[in-house]
Image: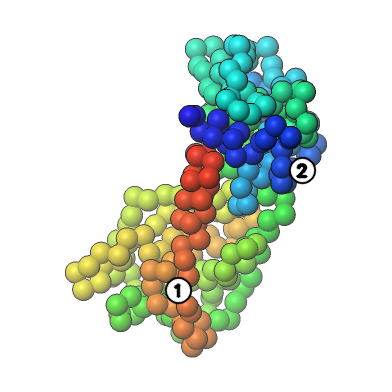
Amino acid sequence: MSPLAELAKKMFSHSGAENLRILDTEKRIRGILAGKVVFDSTKAKLVWEHKYFPQYWIPRSSFSEFATFPDDEAVSGIDSSSATISVSNRSIPALIVPSSFKSELAGYVKIEFKALDQWLEEQSHIIYHPKDPFHRVDVLSSGRHVKIEIDGVRIADTGSDGGVMSLWETNLPPRWYLPRTAVNWEYLQESQTHTGCPYKGEASYYHAMINGKKYEDVVWWYKFPLLESTLIQGMLCFYPDKVDMWVDGEKKRKEADIAARAKKEIEGSSQAKDAQ
């Protein structure tokens, strides 16, 4: 069964869509595929397919003449259908909710975020996934003393110099971004790993080499953060699960890797291909 069919089975029943968080938006949402505008809508809906972040669903009536829908193929046992949208020589899968369905999503179409070449909100590119309008990121200058160790070796220490930025993000623990002068660079090696966040931008990583052992991707940083997170530009943040961390002398309890757990839950429950 395709990922979209799996998603439909999870979200819908014959009696309608149950326990879904849905929010109307008047933002102009456009999708680009093969150089063509596939849809252009001011009546999209944000749908929380899982608890972590929403996705855009688009009215079928908002699709352009460039997008053709071959015959819908029923998804067994549910009142929705899967289809293929074709633009020029490109085809992508879609999930269509029939207009007769008892749901706010009747007549709406779901397209996987990564299936399109570009998504636009008004004239701004959407990166990684749509933002949650109830999600907030605050970056505050902090006088906290932060110390980092791996296997008993001191990797970073802000000492009395300060310069720490604290980042407070909805439903996540605080993150401590350290100035580059507080880090012992002899232990760090550049990583090829890159991840993305729609609130902060693209993150790069460093490994740590301690006593001949490699600790992968223990620290991340943003070379060119997005506007709302510019105060952490160039600063380093260590994974709490991969290091020993003290903040003002208090050792922080190691937490589960929230991003990894969220990704696993998203993929396991809906087979969606969304990334951080």
Query: Residue 80: horizontal and vertical position, in percent?
Result: 65, 26
Of residues 244 and 60, which is closer to you in this image?
A: 60
| Residue 36 higher or lower than 144, as above or below | above
Element carrying mark 1: loop
* Residue drawn at 50 percent across, 12 percent down: 89
Which circle's residue, 2 or 1, is located before the other in the chain? 2
Instruction: Name which residue lies at 48% across and 79% down.
Output: 252
260 on left or right of 226: left
- Secondary element at image label 2: strand
Residue at the spot of label 1: 254
- Decide if residue 259 is on the left or right side of residue 38: left
The colouring scheme, among rainbow, by chain, secondary structure or one colour, is: rainbow
| Amino acid tagged 2 | Leu
Residue 117: which disc? none
Question: Decide: marks 2, 1 in contact (CB < 8 A)?
Answer: no
Q: Position of residue 41 (x, y in %)?
A: 75, 27
Instruction: Say whether residue 175 is visible.
Output: yes
Q: Is residue 202 visible?
A: no
Tag on residue 23? 2
At x 32%, y 60%, the residue is 216
Q: Residues within 10 Å of mark 2 (few under 14, many from 20)?
A: some
Q: Give the residue type at disc 1.
A: Lys
Q: CA distance from mark 2 to mark 1?
A: 35 Å
As drawn, 255 above or below 262: below
Residue 33: percent from left, percent from top = 56, 22
Q: Is residue 7 rendered to the left or right of residue 209?
A: right
Above or below 225: residue 139: below
